Amino acid sequence: PEGQALIRDQAQAILTQAQAPQTPPQSRAKGEGSQIFAMDDTTGEIIQITGGQGGGGSSSIMVSRVANKVYYLRRTDGKQVLTSIDLDSLFRDSKAGKMKGDNAYEKQHATLPADFRIAGGFTIDADDKTAYFGFSDPYPPEPAPAEPRIRQGSGGLAAFDLTTGAMRIVVRTPFTVGHIQANPFKAGEVMYCNETAGDAATRVWIVNGDGTKTRPVYVEGPDDCGAHDQF
């Protein structure tokens, strides 16, 4: 929504250095480890929107395109749980100074398998029905110095139904994946890359959400170098 930006990890430092407003909003309980914060970019007010154990230990924070909520991974008791936060309710209670308990604003959508190795973060489909995660199989031995800085190994993309939590494999790859991004305008299309921390023979790929039509976004020539990609 307009006027709201999400901040994570180092936001506590920003919060402690910021000038306190005359009527500060109420935040979630401080919690343990890194947490997620929201900042109103008009007033400068910062509100902690996660709390408790494992509240913000995620490489990705995804904003819904159909509702005022965000998705993140809550890590508790050794499990990684895809969770959403109802921002409308949270901001309303924050403004009124009547914040509820840790679970009042959150909904759990899916629990990742215990052996699931995330690669390249996750993304939410444009219709808010599916989450896509990159994953890696167990890595091979350490690479030789001439090989890419990020170890290469097989992996792929997995999809999680946000209603049932069911998981399915979208596509498997012979390389390490990164930069997982759902098309923000068209549901059922996901872009990803061959993550090497540098160049790759063909870096950027795209696939339909049902696993069909895997193809390079751009077929690179010997003199081309693709480094970053974004819808």
Image (spheres, helix red, strand yellow):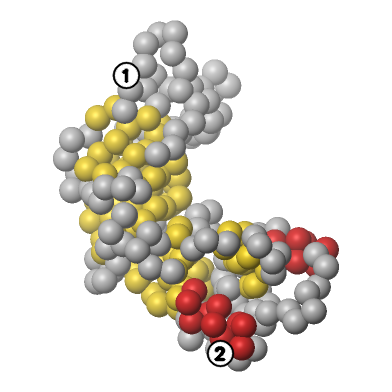
Q: Residue at x 50, y 26 (%)?
A: 227
Q: State whether residue 99 is above or below residue 198.
A: below
For label 2, the SS is loop
Residue 10 % position (x, y): 70, 58
For label 1, the SS is loop
The residue nearer to you, when weighing 50 against 79, is 50
Residue located beneath label 2 in the image: 100
Amino acid type, mark 1 = Val
Number of labelled discs? 2
The residue nearer to you, when weighing 15 against 137, is 15
Q: Is residue 209 left or right of residue 48?
A: left
Residue 68 % position (x, y): 43, 69
Q: Distance between the Cα atoms at labels 2 and 1?
A: 52 Å
- Verify CB contact (< 8 Å) between mark 2 and mark 1: no
Density class for disc 1 (Cα within 10 Å; few <14, some 14-19, many ≥20) is few
Q: Is residue 164 left or right of residue 40?
A: left
For marks 2 and 1, give the one nearer the viewer: 2
Q: Which mark is residue 115?
A: none
